[in-house]
Image (spheres, rainbow, N blue to C red):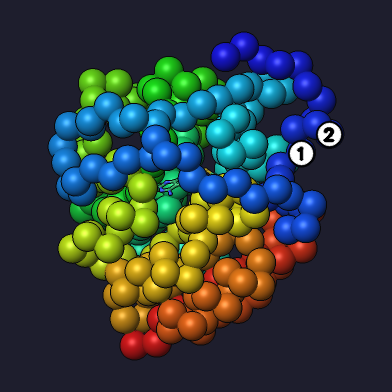
Amino acid sequence: MPATGQSADVARNARDLPDETRNARSLPDEARAAPDGTTDREEPAGTAALEWRDGGIPVSTRFDDPYFSLANGLAETRHVFLAGNGLPGRFRPGFHIAELGFGTGLNMLATLVSWTAAGVPGRLRYTSFEAFPMSAPDIARALRAFPEAEAIAGPFLDAWAAGHSRFVNDTLDLTVVIGDARQTLPRWPDRADAWYLDGFSPAKNPELWSGDLMAEVARHTAPGGSFATYTAAGHVRRALAAAGFAVSRLPGHGTKRHMSAGVLPE
Ligand SMILES: C[S@@+](CC[C@H](N)C(=O)[O-])C[C@H]1O[C@@H](n2cnc3c(N)ncnc32)[C@H](O)[C@@H]1O
């Protein structure tokens, strides 16, 4: 879709707003589960529905929420998801990150930049759950705002454009599990060392923050593993605590006062 030319005020990241200013919206019927671990991406019934604001910010028209912070998506990723999970300090060979919401792949690419800079031998394992995959051209357009991520995105984008949801090279072992995470995560046979919880805002994308799903996140976390998320919504923190995480509220990124992170006791 063409840029709408709307102002930054109109496009303000709903993830930065208090919960009561947002309207909840449930997942559309077209969200469809697919088997996990596939190598070829099935064309899902629900693909990302986008508009572009301020020239380069993809906004989901389905969820009425931007894919990343208007302030600085890459800096937010590093603050919230990497530092929130104690990364890069916890990286070790075989380290496995899982994510709710693959979106543009920006979190994955930012993590890969950090992994490579840390000089960890072998591949970063990264599994992301996504119901409404973006097209390769849309991802490429979104990444133009982040030259560091764009610089290493080429081989992944080629594989994604060819319909692959698994991508393996010398430094990365990526799987994107296509389908509604409420169906695909319970069937996932693995456990992550760190989770990135990156759905759209809890008020606009409540199905990705439910107590049941947070319990599945905990069930799929290695002992001593962690999660981080930009939201400090009380119901999300309570759900993660009930699932077994020791939850902390930390300073947020940019204008956001707080975020959340936690560790699953050994
Ligand atoms: C804020 S965006 C994620 C941004 C992404 N991490 C990045 O680096 O660009 C939220 C993502 O969650 C996905 N999503 C929403 N509901 C979902 C569900 N029930 N299951 C799986 N993915 C879902 C959306 O399609 C969207 O791609």
Q: State the residue at coordinates (55%, 25%).
A: 50
Residues tagged 1 and 2 counted as in contact (Cβ below 8 A): yes
The local secondary structure at tag 2 comes to loop
> In this rendering, does residue 260 appear at all?
yes
Please state which of residues 77 and 139 is positioned toward the viewer in this rendering. Answer: 139
Q: State the residue at coordinates (60%, 30%).
A: 61
Q: Which residue is mark 1?
A: 12
Q: Is residue 26 above or below residue 169?
A: below
Please state which of residues 242 and 263 is positioned toward the viewer in this rendering. Answer: 242
Q: State the residue at coordinates (49%, 64%).
A: 210
Q: What crowding class fits label 1: few (fewer than 14 Cα within 10 Å), some (14-19), or many (20 or more)?
A: some
Q: CA distance from mark 1 to mark 2?
A: 5 Å
Q: Which residue is mark 2?
A: 9
Q: Is residue 224 above or below residue 93?
A: below
Q: On the rendered image, what quadrant is the N terminus found in?
A: top right
Q: Is residue 88 above or below residue 115?
A: below
